[in-house]
Amino acid sequence: MLIDSHCHLDYLDIPSVAGGIAGALERGRQAGVTAIIVPAVDPSNFDRVAMLAKAYPEVYFALGIHPMYVQGLGDDALIALQNALDRYRHNPKLIAVGEIGLDHYVPGLDREKMEAFYIAQCQMARDWNLPVILHVRKAQDRVLKHLRQSGITRGIAHAFNGSLQQAQAFIAQGICLGFGGAMTYPRANQIRRLAAALPLESIVLETDSPDIAPAWRARGQPNEPQEIAAIAEEMALLRFACAKDIADQTSQNLARLFPVLTQMGYGAQTPESR
Ligand SMILES: [Zn+2]
């Protein structure tokens, strides 16, 4: 049982991915990937991620505006998000508001605007009673502050790269931490230390395909959901654990966050299904 908790599947429709989206999904199935969560990045791909969830049984989706995409958008984008959340509110495969957050790593972004969009989307997550999928770079404390102020207690901080103390603060807020390709690089000491030390109950696995390709993928080769299997093995090495236990526990964590994953037969093994 393997779940890719963060995959921009709609961006895999490129020549360097054999067979495009369908090919990547098939290779994922062969590797044992049973569910894939696809976050949106801006209003132009809301319907695209929803269509992927309709077309493929293992695909689930989130709707939100990514902090790096905020720059070119106006407030009408937030209205478009409201409308999309309303339009898909009865769709069981809409499982979160995301990808939202703050990026203080990339230079030149309008931080005030980014924060205003983030706060507005936290409020929507609260209003629609949905977990959040977070993008956080060099802004852990501010992201947390607004989670607390909005009363959000469920979600994932994807590709986590903060300190141990920040990790513990996210966990205390009910947020799981996503680990993927970055953890596979021998020099990523801080991330590897966190992946080894944090409670497994708060960890989820992700590829962030087509980005953050693991160390073993050839240079320039886009990342794909199938890598979740090897990412689970890498985490098992770091934790002196077995890969199956890593896969099972991280899947259970996702099923706890998104109960629909179990209701639809994916995610954690339940006693009844055993
Ligand atoms: Zn992402």
Image: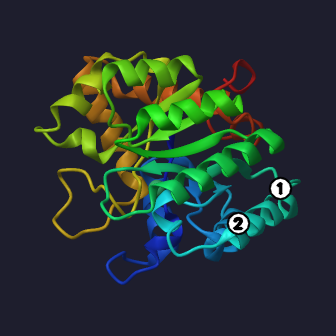
Decide: few, some or many residues near mark 1? Use Cα within 10 Å; few <14, some 14-19, many ≥20: some
Q: Is mark 2 within 8 Å of ligand 1?
A: no
Give the x, y percent position of residue 68.
Answer: 45, 63
Give the x, y percent position of residue 181.
Answer: 29, 47
Camera-nearest residue between 77 and 260: 77
Q: Earlier in the sequence, mark 2 or mark 1?
A: 2
In the picture, the disc for residue 50 is 2
- Compared across the picture, whether 81 is left or right of 106 comes to right
Query: Quick one: SS at disc 1?
Result: loop
Image color mode: rainbow
- Compared across the picture, whether 180 is left or right of 247 comes to left
Give the x, y percent position of residue 65.
Answer: 59, 61
The type of residue carrying mark 1 is Asn
The residue lying at 40 percent from left, 54 percent from top is 226
> Which residue carries the number 1 mark?
91
Q: Is residue 39 above or below residue 169?
A: below
- Which residue is the extreme one toward the front? 112
**Quadrant of residue 268 within the rendered picture:** top right
**Quadrant of residue 90 within the rendered picture:** bottom right
The residue lying at 43 percent from left, 78 percent from top is 19
Residue 226 visible at all: yes
The type of residue carrying mark 2 is Ala
Give the x, y percent position of residue 29.
Answer: 50, 55
- Compared across the picture, whether 225 is left or right of 215 comes to right
Residue 268 visible at all: no
Query: Quick one: SS at disc 2?
Result: helix
Do the CB atoms of the residues marked 2 and 1 lie less than 8 Å apart? yes
